[in-house]
Amino acid sequence: MAADSVVAVRRGGGEMDLSRLLRHWRTGGSTVSRAFPAATLDRIEAAIGEVERTHAGQIRFAVEADLPTGDLLAGVMGQDRALQVFSDLRVWDTEHNNGVLIYLLLADRDVEIVADRGIHARAGAEAWETVCRAMEACFRDGRFEEGAVTGIRAVGALIATHFPPTGTGRNELPDAPVLL
């Protein structure tokens, strides 16, 4: 992946502190399965498929419970991890550079949107920030499915504005959410 092929929206921040470390230690896979049970994951996948029919872009949704202690001590933040996941899931590998990753670091309740250069150049950081804030508001209230679907629809609308459907209906990336 070329250094200029991805643009991230910085959301979270701050230094490593004991409260963050404890929060990550307390958050595990069972927290993810409670927040995102199988039925919710199915609805998220369906929402991605639905909105991708309205545009020529690609959306991936990934949830990670927590970060390893070593990463926390090294100062790894949600944005850092989101960039890595963007690369690992090959969201950057779309024909028109219009892939978007919605990444949730559950322990921090931090939403990161990483948009490839084709869509970011057209939509801009403020649009992604607005989506992040709406999703985080739902997540703070424990409305995980609503927050995820709201974010997916908002990202889909942004992509549709700039990359309308081409008629080929080609799905370049899987729609299923990823639990890390």
Image (cartoon, rainbow, N blue to C red):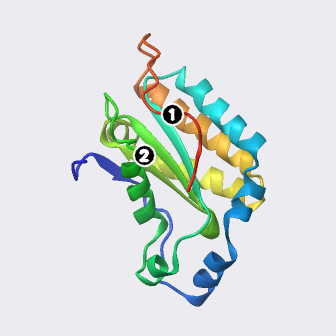
In the rendered image, which quarter is residue 120 located in?
top left
**Amino acid residing under circle 2:** Leu
Name above or below for residue 174 compared with residue 165. Answer: below
Q: Position of residue 74 (x, y in %)?
A: 40, 81
Name above or below for residue 74 compared with residue 58. Answer: below
Q: Residue at x 40, y 41 (%)?
A: 91
**Amino acid residing under circle 1:** Pro
Q: Is residue 137 left or right of residue 2?
A: right
> How many neighbours does mark 2 have within 10 angstroms: few (below 14), some (14-19), or many (20 or more)?
some
Q: Position of residue 92 (x, y in %)?
A: 34, 41
Q: Which residue is mark 1?
A: 174
Looking at the rendered structure, the secondary structure element under dot 1 is loop
Q: Which residue is mark 2?
A: 89
Q: Residue at x 40, y 45 (%)?
A: 115
Looking at the rendered structure, the secondary structure element under dot 2 is loop
Q: Is residue 121 left or right of residue 115?
A: left
> How many neighbours does mark 1 have within 10 angstroms: few (below 14), some (14-19), or many (20 or more)?
some
Q: Is residue 97 left or right of residue 20?
A: left
Instruction: Return the residue nearer the eye: 43 or 112.
Output: 43
Distance in Å between CA atoms under marks 2 and 1: 10 Å
Instruction: Return the residue nearer the eye: 53 or 73.
Output: 73
Q: Position of residue 179 (x, y in %)?
A: 59, 52
Q: Residue at x 63, y 69 (%)?
A: 107
Location of the C terminus by quadrant is bottom right
Q: Residue at x 62, y 25 (%)?
A: 50
Name above or below for residue 179 compared with residue 53. Answer: below
